Image: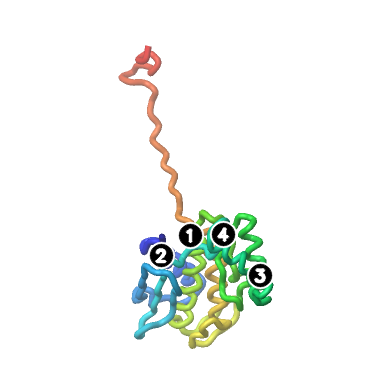
Amino acid sequence: MTNRATITRMTDEILDIAEANGIDVSWRENLVTRTADRKGTSYGGKKNGFPYLSIALKSTGWTFKPNAIKFQNYLDYLVKSHTPMRDKKRYGMTMVEVAKGAGAWCEYRAIAKDTDIGDLYGEPDDELKPLAALLCHEVAHVIDYNSGELEIAGRKFGPRGSVHGTKWREIYRLLRTSYVATGKYKPQVIEFKPPKREMGLIGLPLFDLVA
């Protein structure tokens, strides 16, 4: 299960990306972050006058994984004759990708097919990838409601929050393409190289000592 330290690190990295792209995140020191040991919905925005982020820790991974019970059950649901066609169209391709061996993280139906901010696929063992997408989604809400007027990709937006409107989508697009698609969400691996040592001891070659 995801831990708070990982969420804190990734949130900071996402906010760094926003700041590097000219977005005012001077409120970041006042960001209230809550984590809950439960399944369900995560939230981002403003609460009691403060920027606010709430993450449901048990709902931070892939929505579907190969051979998982949830995947099998939903696949059975989709092939039934009485299943609504809108569900078959929405999740048909998702089931195909999971059947091929990918993990799938599902976005809202309205943006699911968007190539930048829609459904996400990846290695099932890479649990940080769907978490990174979730955090980009929720941090985009926090920015939407706390950063005032914005200009993204030459397009200007007013100070009001847009829920899941165009302003939020463009913030989300910036964050996710910069953080998730590039792989920057992965922790940096520092390679340890031990210092070189001479193969001799007190002036004697090692093979002489062994002999």
User: Which is more N-terminal, label 3 or label 4?
Assistant: 3
Q: What whole-number distance in Å separates the C-alpha atoms at marks 2 and 4?
A: 20 Å
Q: Which residue lies furthest to the top in this view?
A: 211
From the viewer's perspective, tell me whether residue 142 is left or right of residue 84. left
- Circle 2 SS class: helix
Q: Where is residue 79 in the image (x, y as percent from the top left)?
A: 66, 67
Work out whether 17 lies above or below 84.
above
Amino acid carrying label 4: it is Gly
Name the residue carrying label 4: 103
Residue at image point 33% right, 18% down? 203
Q: Quadrant of the N terminus?
A: bottom left
- Circle 3 SS class: loop
Label 4: few (<14), some or many (≥20) within 10 Å? many
Residue at image point 60% right, 76% down? 109
User: Which is more N-terminal, label 1 or label 3?
Assistant: 3
Name the residue carrying label 1: 128
Which marked residue is nearer to the observer: mark 4 or mark 1? 4
Name the residue carrying label 2: 7
Q: What whole-number distance in Å separates the C-alpha atoms at marks 4 and 3?
A: 23 Å
Tell me, yes or no, if residue 182 can be seen here: no
Q: Position of residue 201 (x, y in %)?
A: 33, 20
Work out whether 84 lies above or below 179.
below
Label disc, if present, on residue 98 of the rendered structure = none
User: Which is more N-terminal, label 1 or label 4?
Assistant: 4
Amino acid carrying label 2: it is Ile
Q: In which quarter of the image is the C terminus?
A: top left
Label 1: few (<14), some or many (≥20) within 10 Å? many
